[in-house]
Amino acid sequence: MNIAVNKTRAWKKLDGHYKTMKKTQMRDMFAEDDSRADKYTLQLENMRVDYSKNRINDRTMKFLFNLARECRLEDKIKAMFAGEKINVTENRPVLHIALRNRTNTPIYVDGENVMPKINEVLAKMRKFSEAVRLGTFKGQTGKKLTNIVNIGIGGSDLGPVMATEALRKYWAKDINCYFISNIDGTACAEVLGKIDPEETLFIVASKTFTTIETLTNARTCRKWLVDALGEHAVAKHFVALSTNEAEVRKFGINPENMFEFWDFVGGRYSMWSAIGLSIAIAVGMDNFEKMLDGAYAMDQHFYHSEFEHNIPVILGLLGVWYNNFFDCHRYAVVPYDQYLQYVPAYLQQLDMESNGKFVSVDNEYVKYATAPVLFGGAGTNVQHSFFQLIHQGTEMVPIDFIIPAISHNEIGEHHEILVANVLAQSEALMRGKTVREAAAEMTAAGKSKETVNFLKKFKSFEGNRPSNTIVLKKIDPYSLGMLIAMYEHKVFVQGVIWNIDSFDQFGVELGKQMALSILPELENNASGIRHDSSTTALISYIKKLRK
Ligand code: F6P
């Protein structure tokens, strides 16, 4: 039994400390201490994490580190890396770190070293991705396969979508990647309408190989291919990424064309596994392995660094500070890089599916908030959408800003303008603008006294709004690996503090189960389920419209 986090000594200290810190202004703390940025900045190779624009001081950090210690974070990190079954509800180890264990130190699960089978799949991915890229693995009619269509959803989609987009500059010139995830027929129709079956490789990505969206989409794509090229073509145009060989066979994909992974890899942690095949084909296996190298560097940092210098630990604890003491249950991630546009969507699953839980690993209802709502989008676009609320809304929203120092597309002044914006946003959020400053500014601009008095509150910014700024040298496979592994471990840290199982996802089951009961009713068969009057009326209304 773990101690409930809200009963720890550190929690009580933080509770008391919050009462002082809620009144403390960051701009005053910066004015009082020239070394604040230095003190609260961490560097790992080419990644810099400046967390100085947070509502913290040394006491805050001390209490937060104590909290981590009281929650036995160090033991839990060790347990994950040692392959212990920390996913208690599913009785599984959690070993995405083994997928990028680049020194091959043995990691045992039930007495078996998992590294040989991981390396075997990596070798198979290398062979296959190179053959597709070189055109030696051809389609049924002898043409090179240049359209790569990943069919998957959730963790079997978001990682590949996010990483291929992030690394678009590294794609082979003649290769195009497409992603079909939604069960909405539009997703299939839009992709199939653009591609030539003779040049298309379908990658069916599903850990369980039972997910209705993926299997329905895969069947539609299979039929489309067979109608064009015949049944024989399936062997040349379909591969599967899964843990479930029996279902892969049942679907009609030869297990030779299957790339395996294992139950110890969670769906939302699987882009480092065979699930990353589309990434490997797009950017080449050498680059895929550089991404693993970057993640490995972050794993090592996370495993070995003292909490006081540990990036994921500190980011995780800052999240707890806002979520549980400031009652900020929203959190934004804003990459200032077009290639990172899907990072927020990826992190939504990572964070919210991992830590959106209300039962602790000790089978008790938790009595404190767990995962916040995560949202975001690429800057500067989002400055013109939700940033109004970030600056002047009634609730504080902590933000992570991510910016590469060097762009892949250094055109004119674009990148300087981008960098100026990200730095301006974090400074503006921290500093704010008082009513008096707003009034003085308008007076200096020659506005009438009446206008100044009327507008001064509207034009003020309370400031004191926190952010982290993560600077990378450039978005490359290595830095992307570091960045994503950093967030994985941050989520892990928070799961430990909140004493929840970050690796199951029972919350997605009920809706799936009920959809299966509604499906026959839409097809005019009784399901035997008695719905509420709203659902019954909606079913009959939609059926009437579809007649
Ligand atoms: O949404 C639930 C979920 O199980 C995710 O955790 C997972 O990433 C996704 O569905 C897809 O599952 P699978 O890879 O088994 O098709």
Image (cartoon, rainbow, N blue to C red):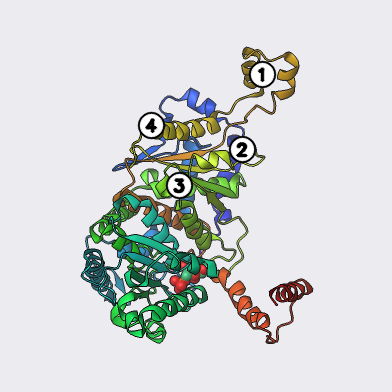
Front position in the image: 500 or 137:
137
Front position in the image: 226 or 64:
226
Rendering coords of residue 24 (x, y %): 58, 31
Mark 1 — residue? 439
The residue drawn where x is 49% and y is 59% is: 495
Q: Residue 38 — which label?
A: 4
Q: Secondary structure at mark 2?
A: helix
Give residue 221's quadrant in the image: bottom left
- Determine whether, in the image, residue 75 is placed left or right of residue 431: left
In 3D space, how far apart are the residues under numbered discs 4 and 2 (Cα atoms)?
30 Å
How crowded pointer 3 is (Cα within 10 Å; few <14, some 14-19, many 20+) is rated as: many
Q: Is mark 1 within 8 Å of ligand 1?
A: no
In 3D space, how far apart are the residues under numbered discs 1 and 2 (Cα atoms)?
20 Å
The residue drawn where x is 55% and y is 69% is: 184
Q: Residue 315 — which label?
A: 3
Q: Earlier in the sequence, mark 4 or mark 2?
A: 4
Rendering coords of residue 4 (x, y %): 56, 59
Say what amino acid the circle numbered 4 marks: Asp
Front position in the image: 23 or 502:
502
Query: Marks 2 and 3: which is nearer the front?
Result: 2
Residue furthest right as drawn: 533
Mark 2 — residue? 388
Q: Earlier in the sequence, mark 1 or mark 2?
A: 2
In 3D space, how far apart are the residues under numbered discs 2 and 3 (Cα atoms)?
25 Å
Q: Secondary structure at mark 4?
A: helix
Front position in the image: 368 or 65:
368
Give residue 81's quadrant in the image: bottom left
Q: Earlier in the sequence, mark 1 or mark 3?
A: 3
